């Protein structure tokens, strides 16, 4: 089977594709920030001793994790306006849906990290007189962060890839633009290839940087 | 002068009553040893003293102030976390497993309390921490992370961390139990030094010889009660208490 590759056409659309990549990265960055904040709040609430907070939060997390993210997104885009009468822009809907979805995973990562901290390190902090907030800020948070760094980076990469779902509600991210160009040029294989390459060159350096930093702190603190 | 008073302290975990009414006063400058079988409640008592565990009944007074709670009328109400925090730092603790924070250097471990809790200016806290490290013989390890230190060195940093708080009293929970035998003496020597300097110390220990040589008084805990108490000459000699005799014989060898 012969296929006559033609990447010259792709080159003509380079500006559009780069704009798409930028859009994707921006979408991912906003989603990562909001879902990390939301996830941290959920993780802390889940550890709270206030009655009902724990079962409510953990049920919410289980439900959100059980729904495929595309279903959540499309449902929010088409069903929510019917139910609530509130119509949100595509971009906003994507950020909200992806943030809710990812926050459930971030919450689990944060919770695991917080729980993994040696009781003794917390007791030592209490014994020198640190208050609860100081113990968290000075001891628990930095130690937990080091421990959850790899899964955190992983989750960020998943968010980045999940942004490709934004195309379903016509948000002009990289894959969506790639598909539009391929419809116009009849060159889907070239465009998919280029989109894949653009994702790889964005994500691989992130992974490498993460591995580098992880190795650095391991050498420093846990040799 | 009475520094610490423990009055009728009880502690239960659910149905398990671990401390069944402990009364003890500690004078300033006194060295008190706690001995007793595993599970007799030694660590629990230490943790009730600095209110890491709240006693289920009774109270602890440091310089006449109730620890962790205060009397309002004739009711006990919990102290604010700021008040408790100031009380805790007056009763520094040294742990069996050192519990140094792995992401901080020896110096940073020692500085943490003065800077964060006492809010002492960084440069002053640094000088103080270096002095504390020098006192345990580790000035040259200031910039090492705990993972690069031997067990004995880690425990000495733990002691320096306690010293830097300028506590009224230091609570030791089996400070040498986790150490290889050849590292025990360097830690005991540091504690002996603090005793000589007139610090008030409470030491939970299985090192009977050390308890005999260093302590002014030794408390034998048995099943959550003080079964016997007195100077080392009493506990390790004259006592008529058969359980003390048996316990001491088993550990003393
Ligand atoms: N947080 C807790 N919850 C339930 N039980 C506890 C708790 N802490 C201690 N205990 C129980 O209280 C009893 C006394 O424990 P404690 O640690 O005070 O003994 P110990 O004299 O220090 O013993 P060791 O020499 O082994 O350190 C034990 O039976 C222990 O299982
Ligand atoms: Mg113990």
Image: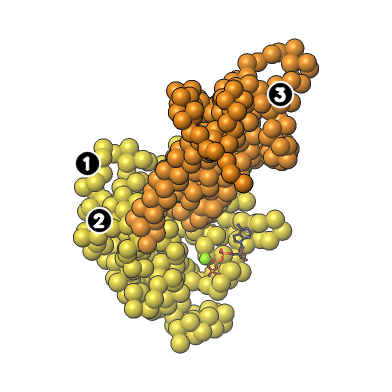
Res A47 quadrant in image: top right
Chain identifier of the yellow chain: B
Q: Is residue A171 visible?
A: yes
Ligand 1 sits in quadrant: bottom right
Label 1, secondary structure: give it: helix
* Residue of label 1: B123
* Same-chain status of marks 2 and 1: yes
User: Vertically, is B43 above or below A23?
Assistant: below
Q: Nearer the viewer, mark 2 or mark 1?
A: 2
Query: Which chain does orange denote in the image?
Result: A
Residue at the disc numbered 2: B142
Instruction: Name the mark on residue A10.
Output: none
Task: Categorize mark 3 by other alpha carbons within 10 Å: few (<14), some (14-19), many (20+).
Answer: many
Residue A87 picture location, percent across and down = 69, 13
Q: CA distance from mark 3 to mark 1?
A: 55 Å
Using the numbered discs, state the Cα–Cα distance from disc 2 to disc 1 in whole angstroms: 15 Å
User: Quick one: which residue is furthest to the bottom in this view?
Assistant: B253
- Looking at the image, which residue is at 76% across and 21% down? A79
- Residue sitting nearer the eye, B234 or A138: A138
Which structural element holds mark 3?
A: helix
Q: CB of residue at label 1: within 8 Å of ligand 2?
A: no
**Residue labelled with disc 3:** A76
């Amino acid at each position: 089977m012969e296929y006559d590759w033609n990447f010259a056409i792709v080159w003509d659309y380079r500006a559009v594709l780069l704009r798409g990549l930028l859009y994707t990265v921006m979408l991912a960055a906003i989603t990562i920030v909001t879902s990390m904040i939301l996830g941290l709040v959920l993780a802390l609430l889940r550890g709270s001793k206030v009655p009902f907070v724990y079962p409510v939060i953990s049920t919410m997390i289980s439900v959100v994790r059980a729904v495929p993210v595309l279903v959540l997104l499309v449902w929010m885009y088409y069903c929510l306006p019917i139910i609530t009468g509130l119509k949100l822009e595509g971009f906003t809907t994507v950020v909200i849906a992806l943030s809710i979805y990812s926050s459930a995973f971030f919450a689990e990562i944060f919770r695991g990290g917080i729980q993994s901290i040696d009781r003794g390190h917390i007791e030592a902090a209490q014994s020198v007189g640190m208050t609860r907030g100081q113990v968290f800020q000075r001891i628990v948070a930095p130690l937990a962060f080091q421990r959850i760094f790899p899964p955190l980076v992983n989750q960020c990469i998943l968010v980045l890839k999940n942004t490709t779902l934004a195309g379903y509600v016509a948000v002009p991210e990289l894959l969506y633009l790639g598909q539009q160009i391929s419809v116009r040029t009849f060159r889907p294989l070239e465009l998919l290839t280029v989109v894949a390459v653009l994702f790889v060159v964005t994500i691989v350096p992130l992974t490498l940087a993460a591995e580098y930093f992880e190795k650095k702190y391991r050498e420093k603190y846990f040799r | 002068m009475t520094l610490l008073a423990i009055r009728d302290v009880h502690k239960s975990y659910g149905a398990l009553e671990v401390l069944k009414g402990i009364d003890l006063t500690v004078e300033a400058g006194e060295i008190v040893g706690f001995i007793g079988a595993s599970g007799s409640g030694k660590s629990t008592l230490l943790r009730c003293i600095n209110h890491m565990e709240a006693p289920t009944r009774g109270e602890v007074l440091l310089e006449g102030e109730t620890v962790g709670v205060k009397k309002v009328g004739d009711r006990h109400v919990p102290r604010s976390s700021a008040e408790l925090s100031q009380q805790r730092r007056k009763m520094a603790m040294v742990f069996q497993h050192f519990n140094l924070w792995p992401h901080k250097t020896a110096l940073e471990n020692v500085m943490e309390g003065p800077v964060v809790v006492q809010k002492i200016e960084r440069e002053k806290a640094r000088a103080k921490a270096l002095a504390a490290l020098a006192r345990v013989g580790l000035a040259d390890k200031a910039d090492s992370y705990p993972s690069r230190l031997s067990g004995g060195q880690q425990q000495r940093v733990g002691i320096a961390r306690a010293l830097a708080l300028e506590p009224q009293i230091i609570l030791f929970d089996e400070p040498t139990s986790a150490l290889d035998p050849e590292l025990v003496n360097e830690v005991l020597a540091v504690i002996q030094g603090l005793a000589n300097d007139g610090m008030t110390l409470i030491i939970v220990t299985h090192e009977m010889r050390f308890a005999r040589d260093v302590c002014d008084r030794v408390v034998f805990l048995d099943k959550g009660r003080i079964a016997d108490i007195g100077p080392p000459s009493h506990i390790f000699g004259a006592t008529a208490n058969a359980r003390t005799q048996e316990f001491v014989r088993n550990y003393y060898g």
